[in-house]
Image (tube, grey):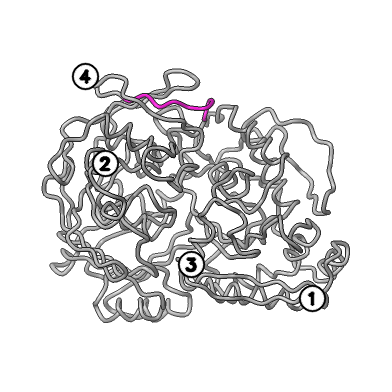
């Protein structure tokens, strides 16, 4: 596999275009991985009828393809309703006229893809709703931190504008056998300190995520699903072998999205607190200032192994209030405002110095219901809550059409999406009946929502709670918490630490159903609020089969 003909900065910029957004979900990578396609797929074993009654089962033949098993898994989640299925989030950005930049579907903002449109565009500022939870690239699970650490850290692979997997810190990758893949590590790549990237650094970085005895309990372990560890195969040939628990049909797609590479000697020479407040990567920007909770500032890395970035500095700050982010954009204090709410769009569009850039994201917004606590231990009750919610009204009136309704965890265009599943319609009579059947009439439930993390998150939660509260036999309310508080509860690995009912968003840049269902709904999922032997079986079967070729 040869290096891309065009510069990475150019394709990262192009990857934000509408055409590339579609392509990103539809093309195969170079390593034998299959990603979603717009062409019809073999859905052997897929479902054609809707089953919404709790505990109702229908005899269906076993699927004979990976796609079929994932479709069946999506059918299971729809029927058992461990979530209130909400919508696909749109990423809506306000953008200064001083820069040229296109948003990506995966919500990652790479300053390397930004080019100045005026002299003022040399120094770029971005305002998010939240800042980081620390600078360790392997010790977090949230996009705001991703957008900070990706400026300085890089992985082995990434995707180009057409959606194909391409090499970054790897120059080659291949499958040696069913349980082993191999990467060739790029030579002459300096870390910011001047140390040279080695195969040992790559193996260490992989092991630090998937092995609990390499320094931290990484919350990213399921992002490298099926990866058991890595070892240097040959220092002379700069190769690293990665050991898998099975076939792992999405291994290269996973490495094209996850696993930032760290300097082994630097990590081992410093404690976790230091690693969380400093950066030692290979990326196009170097950390110049860090004030936790205030701002993170970067300077261009002029010793970068690839073409240097087009902009000189990149600073990230935050404002939880969307109106504050928009005011900063319109006053010239920031160049990119993240999550511009619908009611502010016209104000930005009417400005002479800013515009709106919007793209359907890879993020699903949902309300998780813990299956192990009353009343959510009843599938009937969980379905009732879904029937009580008016998704169309929320998308139309709260999001002002910046969203798309969903009735399954997997978004349209992803591998494993079940096109025969429709979102739950609003049916208050059926919802009331199901509550009675569940035995939980007169239940009182509370929906916990973060503040300002997702587009209109508080307003969505309030709408959901209000709609459910219309049922005569259920009382529902919403409670706001800081996003950091909710993250600390859902990422412990213990279901008991999670709220009973909570609003969360999940981005999946692999475009494969497994990377949403496994971590969030499998019995051993790192963030799971659900457990079911049949769903686990379907996921295991899916992971034992190769992805179908396009």
Q: Quadrant of residue 229?
A: top left
What is the number of the mark on residue 485? 3
Task: Please rate how many residues cluster around mark 3, counting C-alpha atoms within 10 Å: few if below 14, some from 14 to 19, many from 20.
Answer: few
**Which residue is rendered at x = 67% and y = 60% of the image?**
369
Relative depth, front residue between 496 and 162: 496
Disc 4 marks which residue?
236
Judged from the image, the secondary structure of the residue bearing numbered disc 3 is helix
Mark 4 vs mark 3, foreground winner is 3
Disc with the residue nearer the chain's start (1 vs 3): 1
- Vertical comparison of 299 with 334: above or below: above
Task: Give the residues in magenta.
Answer: 240-248
Task: Identify the secondary structure beneath mark 2.
Answer: helix
Left-right relation of 325 to 190: right
Q: Position of residue 259 (x, y in %)?
A: 37, 41
Residue at the disc numbered 1: 471
Which residue is the site of mark 2?
A: 268
Q: Are marks 4 and 1 in contact (CB under 8 Å)?
A: no
Give SS at disc 1: loop
For label 1, count other residues whose C-alpha is less than 10 Å away and answer few (under 14), some (14-19) or many (20+): some
Q: Do the residues bearing badges 4 and 3 touch, measured as CB atoms within 8 Å?
A: no
N-terminal-most mark, 2 or 3: 2
Q: Which residue occupies 70% across, 50% down?
A: 421
Provide residue 40's location: percent of width, then percent of height.
61, 37
Disc 2 to disc 1, C-alpha distance: 57 Å
Location of the N terminus by quadrant is top left
Q: Secondary structure at mark 4?
A: loop
Name the front one of labels 2 and 1: 2
Which label's residue is closer to the chain start, 4 or 2? 4
């Amino acid at each position: 596999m040869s290096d891309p003909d065009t510069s990475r900065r150019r394709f990262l910029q192009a990857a934000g275009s509408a055409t590339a957004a579609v392509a990103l979900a539809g093309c195969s990578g170079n390593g034998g991985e299959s990603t979603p396609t717009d062409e019809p797929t073999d859905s052997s074993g897929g479902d054609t009828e809707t089953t919404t009654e709790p505990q109702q089962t229908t005899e269906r033949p076993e699927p004979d393809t990976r796609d079929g098993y994932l479709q069946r898994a999506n059918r299971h989640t729809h029927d058992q309703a461990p979530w209130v299925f909400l919508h696909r989030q749109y990423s809506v950005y306000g953008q200064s006229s001083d820069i040229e930049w296109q948003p990506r579907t995966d919500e990652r903002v790479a300053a390397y893809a930004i080019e100045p449109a005026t002299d003022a565009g040399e120094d770029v500022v971005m305002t998010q709703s939240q800042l980081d939870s620390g600078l360790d690239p392997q010790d977090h699970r949230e996009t705001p931190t991703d957008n900070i650490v990706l400026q300085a850290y890089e992985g082995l692979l990434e995707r180009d504008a057409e959606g194909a997997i391409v090499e970054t810190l790897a120059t080659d990758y291949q499958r040696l056998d069913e349980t082993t893949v191999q990467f060739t590590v790029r030579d002459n790549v300096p870390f910011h300190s001047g140390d040279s990237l080695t195969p040992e650094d790559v193996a260490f970085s992989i092991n630090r995520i998937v092995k609990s005895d390499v320094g931290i309990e990484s919350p990213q372990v399921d992002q490298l699903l099926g990866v058991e560890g890595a070892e240097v195969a040959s220092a002379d040939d700069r190769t690293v072998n990665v050991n898998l628990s099975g076939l792992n049909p999405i291994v290269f797609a996973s490495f094209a999205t996850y696993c930032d590479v760290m300097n082994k000697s630097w990590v081992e020479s410093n404690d976790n607190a230091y690693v969380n407040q400093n950066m030692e990567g290979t990326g196009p920007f170097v950390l110049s200032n860090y004030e936790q909770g205030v701002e993170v500032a970067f300077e261009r890395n002029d010793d970068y192994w690839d073409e240097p970035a087009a902009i000189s500095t990149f600073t990230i700050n935050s404002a939880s209030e969307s109106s504050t982010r928009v005011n900063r954009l319109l006053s010239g204090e920031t160049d990119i405002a993240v999550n511009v709410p619908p009611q502010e769009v016209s104000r930005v569009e009417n400005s002479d110095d800013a515009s709106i850039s919007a793209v359907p994201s890879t993020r699903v917004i949902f309300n998780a219901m813990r299956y192990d606590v009353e009343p959510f231990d009843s599938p009937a009750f969980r379905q009732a809550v879904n029937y009580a919610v008016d998704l169309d009204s929320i998308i139309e009136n709260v999001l002002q059409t910046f969203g798309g309704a969903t009735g399954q965890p997997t978004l349209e265009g992803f591998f494993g999406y079940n096109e025969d599943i429709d979102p739950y319609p609003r049916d208050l009579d059926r919802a009331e009946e199901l509550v009675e059947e569940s035995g939980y009439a007169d239940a009182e439930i509370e929906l916990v929502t973060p503040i300002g993390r997702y587009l209109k998150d508080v307003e969505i939660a309030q709408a959901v709670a209000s709609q459910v509260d219309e049922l005569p036999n259920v009382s529902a309310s919403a409670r706001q918490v800081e996003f950091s508080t909710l993250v600390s509860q859902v990422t412990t690995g213990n279901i008991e630490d999670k709220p009973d009912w909570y609003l969360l968003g999940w981005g999946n840049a692999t475009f494969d159903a497994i990377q949403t269902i496994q971590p969030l709904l499998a019995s051993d999922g790192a963030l799971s609020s659900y457990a079911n032997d049949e769903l686990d079986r379907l996921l295991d079967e899916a992971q034992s089969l190769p992805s179908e070729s396009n």
